[in-house]
Amino acid sequence: MGSAQRIRVLVVDDHPLMIAGITGEINAQPDMIVVGQATDGEDALTQYRVHRPDVTIMDIRMPKANGLDAIAAIRGEFPRARIVVLTTATGDVQALRALKEGAAGYLLKNLVRKELVETIRAIHAGLRKIPPEVAQQLAEHVSEEEISAREMDVLRMVAQGKANKVIASELNITEHTVKNHVKSILSKLGANDRTGAMVIALRRGYIEM
């Protein structure tokens, strides 16, 4: 099959071994070929402009611009771009953000060898591809109220072990307001205390350690 008929793929990941493994698997297929590689979100946009791939495999956690920012930037310029998110996390929050930014698929790194090729073909055909465990988490939390941007600021500082008084000072709000934000965060996460909130926030992808 000539290169013109193959599915043209851009691979974006900050780990050289992951890029090499994915590239080797893709290039071993008769109907697809890797046309570009990038190691961060900024380079991903540059490479996309150059190669205009049919499908992009995009890691979420990268230096400079992360995968979510890169997806937003690429889809902003190229609304028809078909992008598959590559991540170790099953958390519903990251998945939902990626899908909201326009990702068409979600591929867990521990399933790359098993599902990479099938996922690329599905996305190229115009389908969506979301792992069952991620879809289940999305369904479980779909009706819940989202944590606001200000609450996320507080949540990150709580995760850093900062006291309410310190958080209030750094965010230029009152300690009473911080307490109200923490109370709201606990309610939205279904947590009994700050420690429980951290565990849930980590599992669902609100924060990273």
Image (cartoon, rainbow, N blue to C red):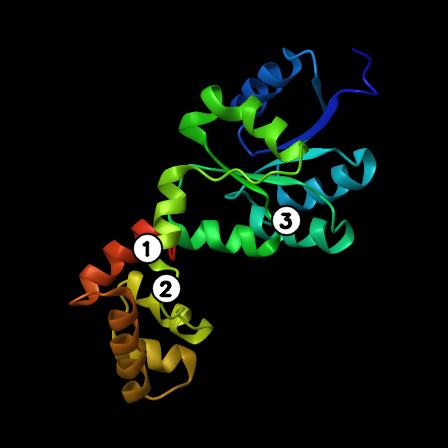
According to the picture, the residue beneath numbered tag 1 turns out to be 140
According to the picture, the residue beneath numbered tag 2 turns out to be 156
Image quadrant in which you'd find residue 30: top right
Local packing at callout 3 (Cα closer than 10 Å; few below 14, some 14-19, many 20+) is many
Residue 119 against residue 174 in the figure, above or below: above
* Residue 39 location (% of width, % of height): 62, 35
Kindly tell me whether residue 208 is visible in this rendering.
Answer: no
According to the picture, the residue beneath numbered tag 3 turns out to be 71
Q: CA distance from mark 2 to mark 3?
A: 23 Å
Q: Pick whichever, 200 or 136, lies toward us.
A: 136
* Residue 112 location (% of width, % of height): 48, 25
Q: Left or right of 165: which side holds 130?
A: right
Instruction: Name the quadrant of the N terminus.
Output: top right
Question: Tag 3's secondary structure?
Answer: helix
Identify which amino acid the numbered label 1 is placed on.
Glu
In percent of the image, x 71 and y 49: which residue is there? Answer: 74
Identify which amino acid the numbered label 3 is placed on.
Ile
